[in-house]
Amino acid sequence: MELKKLIRHPTNLFLNLLFPALLTIVFIFTFSDPEMGMNMNSLVPGLIVYAVIFLIMTVAQSFSSERKLLRRLKTTPMTSTEFMGSQIIANLIIAIVQVTIVIVLAYLLGFKPEGDIGGLLFALPVTALFALSSVGLGLITATVSKRPETGIGISFLFILPQMFFGTFIPISSSTQQIARFVPSHYLFDALKLIFEGNWMSQTFFFDLAIISTISILTIIIGIILFEKYGNI
């Protein structure tokens, strides 16, 4: 049901699949010039991060718009745990599809990663793991928003900091400390190391540990808050 929403709702289809593709094409043609201080190994990880963090908005919008349906679930054999599980699985699949779209399009447009195929495939589960934090933040957003429009607005409180402090957008030395507290910074760094062929480094495993910890804690907090206060 969750995956079918991609076809039924044009907004979800655009944000989850077409948006990453469009963003990849536009950014590569616009910012891939080395004279601008960027290279493809930095640009592509940032595009993947952009795509995945927008899951926050789609999850918040979905849960906010289906509160009546969620209340009806109490009268069915389906448990809230099963419903949450379906949301998590669906969004993990979406995240993997997003990574695949970005990498394939980037490769067709000239991206030549230095890592081997094994490292590139490792980018899929790493990104899917990070997607858990986006789902969790979406649940937290849906908890405090009663309407889909409100959920979209509040979700940008989580999206914008991750866009500006946790991706390829240059930051000054004074804001580097802020980036350390932004989850997307660690996904960006991990993906960059994968594409550079350095995913066996100590820094990569540190990034992976941070991503795992943040994602697990966020999804647990999101589920608890939404089940308690989100009228599920």
Image (cartoon, rainbow, N blue to C red):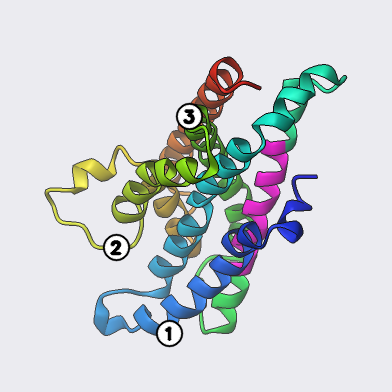
Q: For the residue marked with disc 1, what is the amino acid?
A: Phe
Q: On screen, 185 above or below 70?
A: below
Q: Residue furthest left?
A: 174
| Overall secondary structure of the magenta section | helix
Residue 100 inside the magenta-drawn segment: yes
Camera sees residue 56: yes
Q: Which region shows up in magenta?
A: 87-102
Q: For the residue marked with disc 3, what is the amino acid?
A: Thr
Q: Residue furthest top?
A: 228
Q: Is residue 203 left or right of residue 59?
A: left
Specify which label sits upstream in the sequence, 3 or 1.
Answer: 1
Mark number displayed over residue 169: 2
Q: Which residue is mark 3?
A: 213
Indicate the position of residue 84 as horizontal and vertical percent values: 69, 29
**188 or 155: nearer the eye?**
155
Cα–Cα span, label 3 and label 1: 35 Å
Q: Which residue is mark 1?
A: 29
Indicate the position of residue 219 as horizontal and vertical percent values: 55, 29
Q: The C terminus appears in which quarter of the rendering?
A: top right
Q: Nearer the viewer, mark 3 or mark 1?
A: 1
Q: Are marks 2 and 3 in contact (CB under 8 Å)?
A: no
Specify which label sits upstream in the sequence, 2 or 3.
Answer: 2
